[in-house]
Image: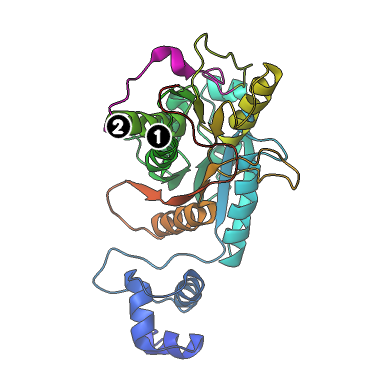
Amino acid sequence: MKKATMRDIARAVGTSAVTVSRAMSGKPGMSDRLRSRILKKAAEMGYEYPGSERMVPKANLDIGILIPDRHFDADSFYADMYKRVIRKLSEQGHFGLLEILDAEDEKRLVLPRMLTASHVDGLILLGEPSKAYYRMIAQAGIPTVFLDFYDEQANADAVTGDNVYGAYRLSSHLIRLGHRKIAFVGNVKATSSIMDRFLGYCRALLANDLPFREDWMISDRKDDGELIPLVLPKEMPTAFVCNCDITARNMIETLLRAGYRVPEDVSVTGFDDFPPPGKNEQPALSTFRVDTDGMIDLAVKHLLERCAGVRKPFGRTVVGGQPVYRNSEQETVPDR
């Protein structure tokens, strides 16, 4: 039986042999959808790309999506990301299978059922479980991508938002508005994302010769992620940089109950731009919009490459975002 050639694949897809070659070699310059069509057709025709470790990925893969239970509520950030992951996989002819990681299974280091039953070809771990757990997953022998967190020692690719830069931009914006007393709200031990956002805040302080104060590091959750009531510091800052929008809105409510006006007395910023502000929300929250679709596109791309047998060093891909300034912050007198 005659082996399929690039020209055969090009004719079947309705494109050129040059385009097929670019798709097979992983070169940029085409849409993910066209690349997926070419790779799928190549797999159907039994074609293998010569002279390369790159293999043609299978069609109709079953991809597991594992989310710790504490991160998954009906309207949560990760529930929204999960829906987008499913949509992306479906567009490329693959299937997504959700499993919620029970807290007790996480503590006892029990592998997810989708892995023990060999139900999936690859895994996206969405939302950060304990370090011991995600390192165990990375050693399980299945292609894995960490989405929205990373670890330098795990054998898995990771895709994150630009947390350091985003928090740096927000903090620098407040400094330009005259703020010199700026607090950070978030438990830096809870997730790598919060840690990186804290580092961005610290970078802005250092760049502007502002002192770091431990009493202006305010925790918003336990180490396991459970949110806790916010406690205002004895000496009030003029602005709060919050690690996420949910915490920022909680901070605004806390300030209002304590008799402060936002932003007239105290400015507040969030992170993620999720959930988006309601029509009548006042003040509408200034934040850093994470490119979740860009993160998901790359996570799926990396995972499909691993499933196809691509061998390369594991690494982290950072996806940019942009600040969104609304009306939860305003200028202040620098010496306040």
Question: For residue 154, which quarter of the picture?
Answer: top left
Name the residue nearer the viewer: 247 or 259: 259
- Classify 336 as above or below 3: above
Question: Which image quarter is the N terminus in?
Answer: bottom left
Name the residue type under label 2. Answer: Asn
User: In the rendering, at what x and y percent does residue 318 appear?
Assistant: 38, 48
Name the residue nearer the viewer: 75 or 254: 254
Question: For residue 247, which quarter of the picture?
Answer: top right
At 43% from the left and 42% from the top, the residue drawn is 166
Q: Which residue is mark 2?
A: 208
Local crowd size for mark 2, using a 10 Å CA cut-off: few (<14), some (14–19), many (≥20): few
Question: For residue 126, which quarter of the picture?
Answer: top right
The alpha-carbon separation of the residues under discs 2 and 1 comes to: 8 Å
- Classify 40 as above or below 124: below
User: In the rendering, at what x and y percent does residue 197 appear?
Assistant: 42, 33
User: In the rendering, at what x and y percent does residue 297 appear?
Assistant: 49, 58
Q: Which residue is mark 1?
A: 175
Name the residue nearer the viewer: 237 or 113: 237
Name the residue type under label 1. Answer: Ile
The answer to if 210 sits in the magenta stretch is yes
At 51% from the left and 53% from the top, the residue drawn is 296
Local crowd size for mark 1, using a 10 Å CA cut-off: few (<14), some (14–19), many (≥20): many
Which residue appears farthest toward the right when viewing the image? 280
> Which region is colored magenta?
207-225
Which residue appears farthest toward the top when viewing the image? 234
At 51% from the left and 75% from the top, the residue drawn is 37
User: In the rendering, at what x and y percent does residue 89 appear?
Assistant: 57, 59
At 55% from the left and 52% from the top, the residue drawn is 63
Tag 2 near tag 1, CB within 8 Å: yes
Residue 249 visible? The answer is: yes
